[in-house]
Amino acid sequence: MAVLNGKVALVTGGASGLGEAIVRAYAAEGASVVIADIDAAGGQALAAELGGNARFVTLDVTRQESWDAAIATCDRIDVLVNNAGITTLGSIEEITLDQFRHELDIDVLGVFMGMQTALPKMKAHGGSIINMSSLSGVKASSNLVAYNAAKAAVTLMTKSCALHFAEKGYGIRCNSIHPGAIHTPIIDKVLAQSDDPKALYQSFVDVHPVKRLGRPEEIAAMAVFLASDASAFATGAEFRVDGGASV
């Protein structure tokens, strides 16, 4: 039996990468999925492919008015997946202030606005909020100062919100997923920032004891669990899907 039957899920960054994998998995499990993304062409194409189980809304996660418009299209939301994000390569000596701010705008403020804006559509009946953090939210790298800062913020913000929702009795669970390196288009963008993409790719592989990168569907499987009633007792938790990299 499809484990997400009757649930409405909004997935940010849903047009590609991990977001696309989560959208596909949710639709396969019976959810009605709102694909929210700045990439209209990709999001509309995915919605058309999936048919009646999915629709697309334009969303720029850095703009409150864009969040307001996207959430207004939903009669209810049972599952919110804050997945949209970027990864900026650079140490404290290399990264610019504008790059640092841009990283935080998308990866931190986008998650904050998503939770705050969706809350009125969720707290009457409960649900699940899933924030995409990272291995980099719990383990530092010298060349990821902005990304480390952003994903660490998501990790603790998730816990704060989980406590608040529990104290208020809203019935909303809030958890974070911490992928290791997953081969998606975002990895290709990071590699393109490097002077030696092959060496950087191998360094990503070497971090994981299982000696490979993860696959998007492996993260999507965790997102299905956290959206489903099977995870009803899980909140404020870090779910690490990282091939042993954080051990």
Image (cartoon, helix red, strand yellow):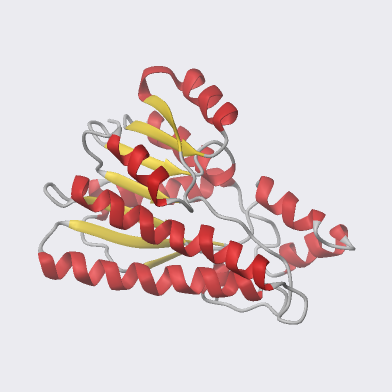
Residue at 85%, 58% in the rendered image = 197
Q: Is residue 190 left or right of residue 128?
A: right
Tell me if I can see residue 245 in this picture. Answer: no
Image quadrant in which the N terminus is located: top left
Q: Is residue 17 left or right of residue 231?
A: right
Residue 19, given in percent of the width and then of the height, sits at 51, 43
- Residue 231, how many percent across, how many down? 27, 55
The answer to whether residue 35 of the structure is visible from this angle is: yes
| In the foreground, 209 or 204 | 204
Q: Determine whether 187 is above or below 9 in the image.
A: below
- Front position in the image: 3 or 181: 181
Q: Is residue 180 left or right of residue 154?
A: right
The residue located at (22%, 31%) in the rendering is: 6
Question: In percent of the image, x 52 and y 24: which residue is there?
Answer: 44
Q: Residue furthest front?
A: 65
- Using the image as rendered, state which of residue 155 and residue 202 is in the foreground: 155
Residue furthest out toward the right? 195
Which of the 4 quarters of the picture holds residue 11? top left
Q: How many marks?
A: 0
Quadrant for the C terminus, please: bottom right
Residue 220 % position (x, y): 47, 45
Tell me which residue sits at (59%, 27%) in the image: 41
